[in-house]
Amino acid sequence: MVGRDSDGRITYDAYDEADRNESIAKWQRVLGEGFASGVVVEEAKSVSRTAIAKIRERMGDAYQFANDLVTLVKNLGASALPPGFDRLPHMRRPKWALAPGAGLHVNVRASLWEGREFGSLGGIQSLQGLPSGRYIRFNAVNNVGVPFGSEYAVHWRVTNTDQEAYDHKALRGGFEKSDSPGVRWEQLSYRGVHLVEAFVVRTRDDKLVGQSAPFYVMIE
């Protein structure tokens, strides 16, 4: 079975993809978001149950006290994240064609604020425990910490996970524009481990030239 991408070209990617989550996401691009929608939602809202099950497989009942992914990460760090956490099927895949030789280095830096654009509380790290209600300012920079110039546009994939975000119909997973060049503001709302990634697109030809690793936002 084949489909057509946004440019009308036939693609076999979804058929050939071996990774389950990637395959579901690619079939959704071909067939629409209704394809396997129940599986997609279940994967997104069940990350805590999946993580606890995987940890118990590895460590027995040593972590039977853990009731969600936040608790596990606070005790075990990034090793508690379940396999495939950074490519869950409800995360929209990039819509831009990859530029030839693309490999621009992209970093995400983040700082915590009392409110949007006021009350800076300093820099934060990926997987640092954070309180709900405050704001994060994300900046996309290159390998030497310099923001990208006007020849590039930065888009952000903002992905929520786990039960609380699901209950509020806020799993997201799509792409958002920058609020100002290379900058994205987000309010901390739902307990869980969430992901923010920066995608740098060259404006003259709308080609993707680089993307960041996920910045994991952990709300306690």
Image: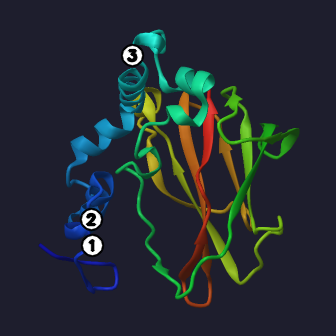
Q: Crowdedness of circle 1 by 10 Å Cα count: few (<14), some, many (20+)?
A: some
Taking depth in this image into account, of 169 and 112 the one nearest to the observer is 112
| Alpha carbon distance from label 1 to label 2 | 6 Å
Q: Name the residue under label 1.
A: 13
Going by the numbered disc 1, the residue's amino acid type is Asp
Please determine whether, in this image, residue 16 is positioned above or below residue 184: below
Callout 1–callout 2 Cβ contact below 8 Å:
yes
Please name the amino acid that badge 2 sits on.
Glu
Q: What element carries label 1?
A: helix
- Relative to 85, say whether 75 is above or below: above
In the image, residue 95 sits, relative to residue 160, either above or below, namely below
Q: Quadrant of the N terminus?
A: bottom left
Query: Closest to the observer: 140 or 214?
Result: 214
The residue positioned farthest toward the front in the image shown: 59
Q: Residue at x 68, y 42 (%)?
A: 126
Where residue 34 appears, as percent x and y from the top left, is: 22, 53
Left-right relation of 32 to 127: left
Residue 17 has which mark? 2
Q: How far apart are marks 1 and 3 (CA)?
A: 38 Å
In the rendered image, the residue lying farthest to the top is: 65
Q: Name the quarter where the C terminus is drawn.
A: top right
Q: Which of marks 1 and 3 is nearer the N terminus?
A: 1
Between marks 3 and 2 in the image, the one whose residue lies nearer the viewer: 3
Residue at 22 percent across and 69 percent down: it is 16
Please name the residue that numbered disc 3 is placed on: 60
